[in-house]
Amino acid sequence: MSLDVSICEQAWLARDPAFDGRFFIGVRTTGVYCRCVCPVRLPYRRNVEFLPSAAAAELAGYRPCLRCRPESAPFCPAWKGSVTIVEKAVRLIREEGALDKRGATVETLAERVGIGARHLSRLFQKHLGASPIQVAKTARVQRAKRLLTETNLPITDIALQSGFGSLRRFNAVFQEVYKRPPTAIKRTLLSSRS
């Protein structure tokens, strides 16, 4: 990504918050990189280098400023805070079935995202209003419903491919969510297609 030096220079001199996180300033004399909104005294222009990302700054040998904390600039995962952890955990649940495999637990999921199980459960409650187990159950039901409507697979195959450990559990969850068994939903879909 190439930066327009004149625009970067103007934003840096004005400490323009509209450009926060869009580029970073590397100061050659100190070896530190900052955000354009950093409140420190501005260094001489000849000692400044404009960089497109925090990663590029670190690759160039700069370390993050302790005052403006460039690693927490907008558009960086740290800026989004704890919701980033929840998003990653939800992605693992939905796309990889992280809580569907035999022996999979909230503890193993929490380990994968780098925090404790109790903290992960608290974050899920805070950001989603549901536990990781409830989110996994909803994801399984959604996968199953999609397979019911889009394929001609037998009910047992749908249950297993959706992440349910048994046909019995699959039927119970469907009855709980849709107030009818999956076979009734399948029959309804087949009759509407005819």
Image: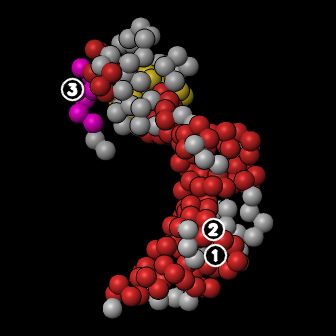
Front position among marks 3 and 1: 1
Whether 5 is among the magenta residues is yes
Q: Mark 1 packing: few (<14 Cα in 10 Å), some, or many (20+)?
A: some
- The residue depicted at 27 percent of the width and 36 percent of the height is 3
Which SS class for mark 2?
Answer: helix
Residue identifier under label 1: 171
Segment colored magenta:
3-10
Q: What amino acid type should be assigned to the residue bearing mark 3?
A: Ser
- The residue depicted at 54 percent of the width and 83 percent of the height is 183
Picture layout, residue 85 above or below residue 179: above
Q: Mark 3 packing: few (<14 Cα in 10 Å), some, or many (20+)?
A: few
Specify whether residue 58 is in view: no
Number of the label disc, if any, that sits on residue 149: none
Taking the view exactly as shown, the residue that stands out farthest to the top is 41
Picture layout, residue 165 above or below residue 53: below
Picture layout, residue 122 above or below residue 148: above
Specify whether residue 11 is in view: yes
Residue 57: image location, x then y, percent: 46, 34
Q: Earlier in the sequence, mark 3 or mark 1?
A: 3
- Distance Cα–Cα, label 2 vs label 1: 6 Å
- The residue depicted at 55 percent of the width and 40 percent of the height is 127
Residue 91: image location, x then y, percent: 54, 56
In this picture, residue 120 sits left or right of residue 56: right
Taking the view exactly as shown, the residue that stands out farthest to the front is 179
Residue identifier under label 3: 6
Number of the label disc, if any, that sits on residue 173: 2
Mark 2–mark 1 CB contact (< 8 Å): yes
Q: Quadrant of the N terminus?
A: top left
Q: Name the one closer to the observer, 132 or 89.
A: 132
In this picture, residue 187 sits left or right of residue 163: left
Residue 184: image location, x then y, percent: 51, 81
